[in-house]
Image (tube, rainbow, N blue to C red):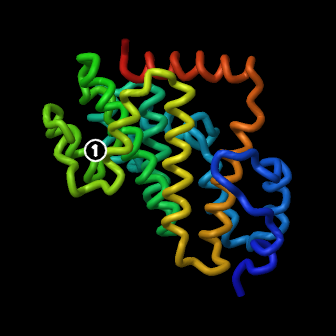
Amino acid sequence: MGYECLLAGLPDLKAGTPSPIPADDLLTLLDESLRESDKPLLDQLRMTPDSENISELYQRYQNPDTNDMDKPSWWDDAASVLTEADLRAAILYDLGQHAKNRFVRAWYAFNQDMNNVLVASICRKHGFDVHKAIVGHNEVSNILRKNTQQKDFGLGGVMDNLQDILDLAAIDNLMEREKKMDALRFAWLEDKTRFFVFSIELVLAYYLEATMLDRWSRLTVEQGEQVFRDMVADMKKGIQL
C-alpha cells in the first residue's frame, strides 16, 4: 500500500498562495503517518548547511584523522577556492545526490544546478571569478567551470529550464529573485511527480511545496527586510565581494 489515506486528507496546495497547513503541523502529521523506512528521506530533505551532521562532516573533512578515509575526493580542490558557507552547501548537495531515493537525488541536483547557474551568471556580470563560486562536481558544474565565457555557459540542450534560470540574474531585488526561484522549484516538483500514485515521492513533494508556501506566508514586513539583509550578506560572502 502507498499513502492513499494521507494524501487524500491533505489540503490542496496552490503556488503563490499561503499554505493551508502550517509547516509544524504538517511535520507532526508526517511523523505519525510515514513508515519508519521512509522517515530518513524526509529527514534528509529537512537538512540545511547549518545542520549538526553537516557541521560534523565539515569539521572532519577540515581536520581529517590519519585513519579517516571518508573525506570525498573533491574536498581538497573545493576547500582551496570555496568559502565555508559554500563548502557546507557542497556537503549538503553531495549527500543529497547520493540518497537512496531517485526523486531526492534529482531534487538536490536540480537545486545545485539552479544555484550554480545563477551564481555563475552574477559573477560573470560583475567580473568575479566564476570558479570560486561553483559548488559540486556533476555534469552541470563541470560544464560551467569550462565555459565561463559562453553566453549559455555551454549548457544549451543540457538543462531544460536554462533560460528561466539565466533570467533570474537580471533581477536586482533579492526578495523577488528568491520568490521566482521558489516558483521554479514548485513547477519542477509538479512536473517530476505527475506520474507518481500515492507514493512517498508525492508526500515528499507535498512537504517541500507546503514549506515554501508557509515560509513566504509567515514573513512580516520586518522579517522580510531581515531576510533581504541576510540574503545580501550571503550573496556578498558567496561571491567574495
Instruction: Count up the numbered dots.
Output: 1
Residue 84 in which image quadrant: top left
In the rendered image, residue 160, in percent from the top left (x then y), is placed at 32, 57
Q: Is residue 227 above or below residue 19?
A: above
Look at the image and tell me whether residue 162 can be seen.
Answer: yes
Give the residue at x 48% y 28%. Answer: 85
In the rendered image, residue 59, in percent from the top left (x then y), is placed at 51, 33
Front residue of 171 and 233: 171
Give the residue at x 81% y 52%. Answer: 20
The quadrant of the rendering that contains the C terminus is top left
Identity, as a three-letter code, of the amino acid under mark 1: Ser
Front residue of 216 and 130: 216
Decide: few, some or many residues near mark 1? Use Cα within 10 Å; few <14, some 14-19, many ≥20.
some
Front residue of 154 and 239: 154
In the rendered image, residue 209, in percent from the top left (x then y), is placed at 64, 53
- Residue tagged 1: 141
Q: Is residue 24 above or below residue 30?
A: above
Taking the image as shown, residue 215 lies to the left or right of residue 130, namely right
Residue projecting furthest to the bottom: 1
Q: Secondary structure at mark 1?
A: helix
Taking the image as shown, residue 26 lies to the left or right of residue 123, namely right
Residue 212 in which image quadrant: top right
Residue projecting furthest to the top: 241
The quadrant of the rendering that contains the N terminus is bottom right
Front residue of 179 and 106: 179
Taking the image as shown, residue 18 lies to the left or right of residue 183, namely right
Give the residue at x 20% y 38%. Answer: 145
Look at the image and tell me whether residue 73 can be seen.
Answer: no
Give the residue at x 54% y 30%. Answer: 176
